[in-house]
Amino acid sequence: MSGQPWNLSLAAWEIGRPGSGFGARVGGLGVVVEQLPPELIRAAARRGLDLHVQTLSPCFGWYDRGALELVEPALPVRLDGGELVFQAYRRRVPQVVSLEEGAVEVDLEMIYLWHPELLGWTEPGSIYPEDPWLGARVYAAVSQAMAAFLERHPAQTLHLHDYHVGLVPFFLSRSLAETMPVHLTVHNGSYQGVVPLQGGGYETLDSLGLDGARLFHRYFDHRDEINLLRAAMLRVHELGGRITTVSGDLEGSWGYAAELRTPQHVLVERAAQLGGSSPLRVFVPNGGLDVFEKLPVAGITNGLSDGCKPERLPELHAATLREQQARRPGEPFFRHPAVQRAMLERDHHFDAGRLAIKAELKRLLHLECFGAEPQGDPPIIVVVGRLVDQKHLDLVLDIVEPVVARVPDARFAVLASATDQAGRAWERAFAAMASRYPDRFFYDERFLQPLSRLMMAGGDFTLVPSRFEPCGLVDYEASLLGNVVIARRTGGLAKMQGCGYLYDWLDEGDPQGEARVFGELVVHALETRRDRPWEHRTKLMASMAVDASWDSSADVYLDLYLHGLQSLAWRRARRELLAGFVDELGPDHARFTRLFAPALEPWADPLDWELFHTLRGDQGT
């Protein structure tokens, strides 16, 4: 590939860049897809590769299509037995990429697929259909439109992100599927695109523009329902691509990659060992989808941009805050006037050699949360996140009183907002806790980025008791800001082993048991800070020195893409070998075919079976 342009297409439902008016970000998926392209270009340049990155995504209803370039006015899509027409729009985004020889500006190409009826309902806070069948129709239609675009504008490699766009390979022509490697990254295996059958399985797929009779049992059928993620994983593997997830290593030996490959019975055994008795309820990361246990799933741990480091963080830059505040007149970022004035008047960037500035940020945080100057140096424990079941932040409520009873000067500062009815009940519980202990517990449901950054930069510890955490970005963000993580050892949070405090727990049916273990760990961390300050400082320094960059991850992705090209070459060579052997049979073809019988599992030889189908003229998928 050296010296030749190499075109990479990334397909995703979220691509980040929400502030531009042409992007969406609900969770970590949008962060990753926003940050990955320039990091890949930078990694490719180090190897002398001319990488061009194009992003494929839906065109959501609030986008101003008049500001986009129409590049394909009619992309045909089949749905419900009829034909729809999508349009493809393009936007070129200038991006400054830092290279060894200096910064250069490159153009990232964004392609947006639009259909008014299927996507016109979307708005910034709502881009995923709540109804599973409606979701399947929208995802299948957009995947078809993406495939149709790629047929007219082929890429050298296609990288799919999550099941929403996982059907693209089913709509590619055979010629394109045999020349363009396709890979799939699973960002959250708990969401699999499970869809109840609409009549029968064949009819359900037929409605989505797929050949139900040929595809249902082989790819989509899981417990008599449609499973879009299962189908996507099987098809990508069949085409020679790799399935990855967002933490772990290529061998899948740790992190989320290892969890997705772990059977339920193994988790139950571990839970019993941790809890000392048979567990009542154990969360299974792969949701019982055994394809995860049978296909090779690799982990590539996501990174963070350099802009998240304390010496570069925009929210610690006074001019940036003033500019952002000007767009929100009458609604100050910080409620305490002295904090608002200090943050907007001067910069507060720091690093491991300038911790006095971090101490000043901690003073401002205490003033903002508790309305008074701190007496001494009380530890501030920070919680930042969404009030959803996955984050398990309700566990924090169970440990506040036991922790404060043993470490009386401990302070809790919580910034968390709800997205559903259950979350709103937790909001009320957090607010009640703040009313009960106003000088010990602070709660704010407004999710303001400047406030969350102050909490991260000024806090001593961050709590992350997630039930599952595929990648973990909040642990990176906190650590880089000198905020030591106290977390459950799950998914990507395991990477904090060397610089944080981690606990193990699996039995969700015993919340009191988990609260006891979690609370003991928090007290241990607080006592370490108080009684063995040198030990705490070692962890703090290790946290700030954690390698959260994209460099190694981007290099692994490039290796993955190059492997995909070589894998296709191997498959072409294998087909040629088989075809050549069949041709050589000549008049003996019928006899050899009649007698040739490959073994079944566990003694099956895949190449024998491929020859078996070649001899009979099977066309496969």
Image (cartoon, rainbow, N blue to C red):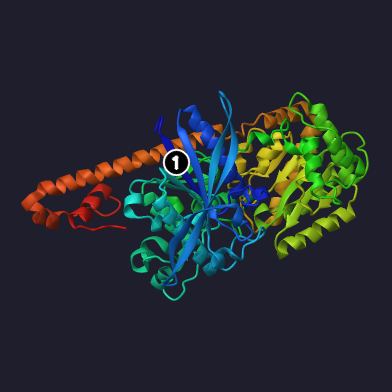
Q: Quadrant of the C terminus?
A: bottom left
**Residue at image coords 46%, 42%:** 8
Residue 280 is situated, as x and y percent measured from the top left of the image, at 61, 60
The quarter of the image holding the N terminus is top left
- The residue lying furthest to the bottom in this view is 199
Q: Position of residue 231 (x, y in %)?
A: 42, 58
- Residue 557, visible in the rendered structure: yes
Q: Nearer the viewer, residue 173 or 572?
A: 173
Amino acid identity at mark 1: Asn
Which quadrant of the structure image shows residue 534? top right
Asked whether residue 189 appears in the rendered view, the answer is no
Which residue is pictured at 90% across the width and 47% down the height?
439
**Location of residue 171 with respect to 180 vertically, above or below:** below
Residue 618: x %, y % from top left: 23, 58
Task: Check disc 1 and report the residue beneath it.
Answer: 7
Residue 482 horizontal side relative to residue 589, left or right: right
